[in-house]
Amino acid sequence: MSLLRRMRDITVASLNEHLERAEDPVRLIDQYLAAQREQLQQSERLYQQCVTHAASLRQQYLTALETKEKREQQALLALKAGEEHMARIVLQEKLQAEEKSEQYRELYEQAKQSILDLDEELQQLKADYKEVADKRSYYLARMESARLQQRLHARSSVSQDASPRMFGRLEERVSDMELHARTLRDVRRMGRESYYGAGNPAVDAELEALRNRLNQEGTNNHEQTIPLTKR
């Protein structure tokens, strides 16, 4: 496992551990994402440097290989021309170019493997970044849901607490009004009964006067009807 991958595993593990205790997980994730973006940028720059270096090694390898083949052809032509001494010199250069091409070929193969490893780790870093970014969206959605639930419960509590008190006060006011109306009605009724009812001296006197008047009228009517009967 490479150093970059070990650092990535440690970082992700630390993030998960801190998220469990964080009061503001979104802020913590934002900090992590900022660090990850910086690491991604550095890794991408390193990747480009590796690609550029591998291209240079490949060019060195191909140049040495071309020189080797060219010196071999030159040695063959010198030998055909009977110039053995020249053929030896050219073959010496051919061996040097062959050794050089082999050295650069090995370096180029190593660079290609490094590029493949680095590309794999870059893809993993990008996947981790996306996963954490998605987790940020999830936590943000959870926090918003919790905030809305708190507001909903707060409004419900206020409504539930206020409604009974409001109707209780209204009930008390209406009851007071009804009691006041009944009290006035009872007072008026009692006044009428005491004024017009039995046992009132003024009423008794009036009734007695009316009775005497009726009796008097009855006597007069009786006296007037007797002479008429005799004629």
Image (cartoon, grey):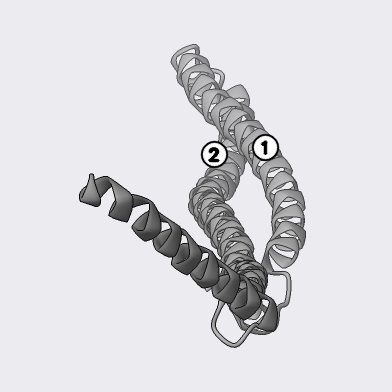
**Residue lying at 52% horizontally and 30% vertically, measured from the top left:** 65
**Residue lying at 57% horizontally and 61% vertically, measured from the top left:** 152
Q: In this view, does 31 lie to the left or right of 71?
A: right
**Residue lying at 56% horizontally and 39% vertically, measured from the top left:** 101
- Is 223 or 125 nearer to us in this picture? 223
Whichever of labels 1 and 2 marks the residue nearer the N terminus, that label is: 1
**Residue lying at 31% horizontally and 50% vertically, measured from the top left:** 227
Q: Mark 2 points at which residue?
A: 98
Type of amino acid at the residue the image marks with label 2 = Glu
Residue 24, x across and y down, in percent:
73, 70
Residue 99, x across and y down, in percent:
57, 45
Vertical side of 36 occupied by 61: above or below: above
Vertical side of 81 occupied by 159: above or below: below
Q: Mark 1 points at which residue?
A: 48
> Quadrant of the rendered structure where residue 154 is?
bottom right
User: Residue 58 bears which disc, if any?
Assistant: none
Vertical side of 211 occupied by 133: above or below: above
User: Under tag 1, what secondary structure?
Assistant: helix
User: Under tag 2, what secondary structure?
Assistant: helix
Dots 1 and 2: beta carbons under 8 Å? no
* Res. 9 in view: no
Name the image quarter holding the C terminus: top left
Q: How far apart are marks 1 and 2 (CA)?
A: 29 Å
